[in-house]
Amino acid sequence: AQSVTQLDSQVPVFEEAPVELRCNYSSSVSVYLFWYVQYPNQGLQLLLKYLSGSTLVKGINGFEAEFNKSQTSFHLRKPSVHTTHTAEYYCAVTQAGSARQLTFGSGTQLTVLP
Amino acid sequence: IAGITQAPTSQILAAGRRMTLRCTQDMRHNAMYWYRQDLGLGLRLIHYSNTAGTTGKGEVPDGYSVSRANTDDFPLTLASAVPSQTSVYFCASSESGSAGGSTDTQYFGPGTRLTVL
């Protein structure tokens, strides 16, 4: 079985502050990991994904995430955020080499305050 | 502009009524998905299709049915709507199916907000 936990349902920060959105997963086999972003009243779009190789993954809009196998984590980070980054962020996991579907976390609402 | 379209944008429905949510993609993607999004629960997969002519059950399939007669369309039907089906429904697609482990990006439509009274 696979599952993903997003530890914070809401993260408020001030503009230009750094931010880390936490994601932990559970799986007995190798995984692929994804971060998606959902802006208000829109569908989800991919920020970045980890498939293999370098554990530091860089995505769009200056976001990055680090895969940590020993801690089963895939935290999303950005050194400086702006009000335009206010959105819901979803971590997702699927088992590599299987027919399993993508499993999403419950989401983290990032609110960037001016 | 290429992408996924969903219809209707929103709908209020009486319990017991039948409803079909429409989803069309023009990217010629093989795989398509239906999710429901509920506060505190994130996205949960209802049904999926790895290729035209095949469908599969996701995490929460009860009360829903799908068909995939062609590559582009993937309608979701609620045969007899109940209030617990009040949700926002997202359709998505990806280039290949999940068989073998999907590394593909999923592309999402704008969603349908459904209220069942």
Image: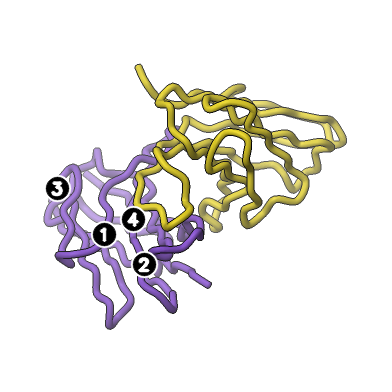
Give whichever of A114, A90 is nearer the camera: A90
Q: Which chain is purple?
A: A
Q: Secondary structure at mark 3?
A: helix
The Cα–Cα distance between marks 2 and 3, rounded to whole angstroms, is: 24 Å
Give whichever of A107, A45 is nearer the camera: A45
Check disc 1 and report the residue beneath it.
A50
Quick one: label 2 or label 1, which is nearer the N terminus?
Answer: 2
Quick one: label 2 or label 3, which is nearer the N terminus?
Answer: 2
Q: Secondary structure at mark 4?
A: strand
User: Chain B appears what colour?
Assistant: yellow
Report x, y in % for residue B20.
71, 28
The Cα–Cα distance between marks 2 and 1, rounded to whole angstroms, is: 9 Å
The Cα–Cα distance between marks 2 and 4, rounded to whole angstroms, is: 10 Å
The Cα–Cα distance between marks 1 and 3, rounded to whole angstroms, is: 16 Å
In front of the other: label 2 or label 3? 2
Check disc 2 and report the residue beneath it.
A31
Q: Is residue B103 above or below residue A20?
A: above
Tell me what residue is drawn at x 65 percent, y 28 percent: B21
Image quarter hosting the C terminus of chain A: top left
Rendering quarter of residue B3: top left
**Chain letter for the residue marked with disc 1 in the picture:** A
Assess disc 4: are there few (<14), some (14-19) or many (≥20) residues with their C-alpha within 10 Å of its C-alpha.
many
Report x, y in % for residue B37.
56, 47
The Cα–Cα distance between marks 1 and 4, rounded to whole angstroms, is: 6 Å
Q: Are marks 2 and 1 on the same chain?
A: yes
Disc assigned to residue A34: 4
Q: Is residue A12 left or right of residue A56?
A: right
Q: Secondary structure at mark 1?
A: strand
Quick one: label 1 or label 3, which is nearer the N terminus?
Answer: 1
